[in-house]
Image: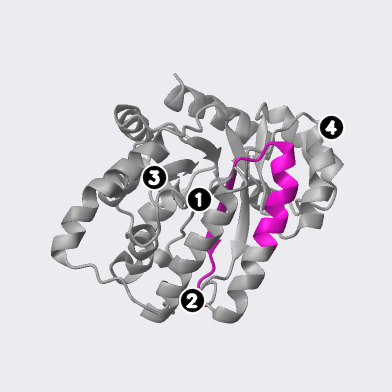
Amino acid sequence: MKKNVLNRRNFLAFIPAISIASTALANRSHHHLPISCNSYNWITFYNRAHKKWGDNLEQNFSEFVKTGIKAYEPNIESPAMAQQLIPVLNKYDIALPSIYVNSVLHEKEAIKTSINTIIAIADVVKNYGTKIIVTNPSPIKWGSNELKNDAQLNLQAQAMETLGKELRQRGLTLAYHTHDVELKAGAREFHHILLNTTPQNVSFCFDVHWVYRGSDNSEVAVFDVLKLYGKRIAELHIRQSIGGVWAETFTAQGDIDYTRLANELTKMNIHPHIVIEQCLEPNSPNTMDVVSAHIKGLSAVKETFLG
């Protein structure tokens, strides 16, 4: 197979093409989608209350709807899981503008299975109005600092491009998501995926706090990433921390200045889909229940990003 060699001269020639494609992607705005909430929030709040989110969908969403949040972003594992969820969302008039799907894209044997599974799920949820498919390619091992080698990163980028093209042909946007491990070793995995896929096929789900934490709690890194890849942002995951610990509810001010972030996005004419992902960790405050926390958080999100 012939390899494309990117030297300094043809890289400089390539920059305008990147800019044009990125701008075209940015113009495919997702700001019309309702503010959403990720399922992981609810998992952590329910765990703290010694309950399990997902055991009783009817009960779960009768509580969810009390927050005033009109959309939901679940982690979908199979088409059957999507088919089970959608009737309940429909009953409570909750939209499904985006979903999160796990994938293994750095191992040859797993790539085809992951892509086929995601496409099968996408074919179900697109009929309920889903526009964005978010995936965070799995690390070598969750919770481990073991990093992918160059061959695995090349495989992963190629697989992301293939998946993104398949989803685009179905009218869907693939958004690349990261946690902290992708920011290690000079953020080589993070940069490799975004620099070796096309904006047309692979957008960016900017999980602000994971970039912050993965960069050793650096707000500078957050705004540098915005400068580098802002035009590829299709979706924003927002979470606040105070003193390095996840807060109980979203606020504009804390370790990350979300007011500044919102202003910068507006200046850059970037209007992503906004997903609240205000989760709990062991040292998070314990002063309010899940509904109260999300009512308060939704109000702060609206004031920060829509005010």
x then y, percent, for residue 126? 69, 43
| Left or right: where 91 falls relative to 106 | right
**Residue at (47, 41) in percent of width and height:** 236
Separation of disc 1 and disc 4 at Cα?
28 Å
Asked if 2 appears above or below 209 in the picture, the reply is below
Closer to the chain start, of discs 1 and 4, is 4
Separation of disc 3 and disc 1 at Cα?
9 Å
Closer to the chain start, of discs 4 and 3, is 4
Q: Which residue is mark 2?
A: 144
- The segment highlighted magenta reads 117-140
Q: Verify CB contact (< 8 Å) between mark 1 and mark 4.
A: no
Q: Is residue 176 magenta?
A: no
Q: Which residue is mark 3?
A: 232
Question: Can residue 119 be spotted in the picture?
Answer: yes
Q: Please name the amino acid that badge 4 sits on.
A: Lys
Per the rendering, the mark at residue 175 is 1
Q: Residue furthest front?
A: 2
Closer to the chain start, of discs 1 and 2, is 2
x then y, percent, for residue 83? 82, 49
Q: How is the image coloured?
A: one colour
Separation of disc 4 and disc 2 at Cα?
40 Å
Separation of disc 2 and disc 3 at Cα?
28 Å
Q: Please name the amino acid that badge 2 sits on.
A: Ser
Q: Which residue is mark 4?
A: 91
Q: Nearer the viewer, residue 268 or 38?
A: 268
Asked if 300 appears above or below 22 in the picture, the reply is above
x then y, percent, for residue 26? 40, 37
x then y, percent, for residue 100? 61, 52
**Residue at (66, 54) in percent of width and height:** 75
**Residue 171 falls in which quadrant of the image?**
top right
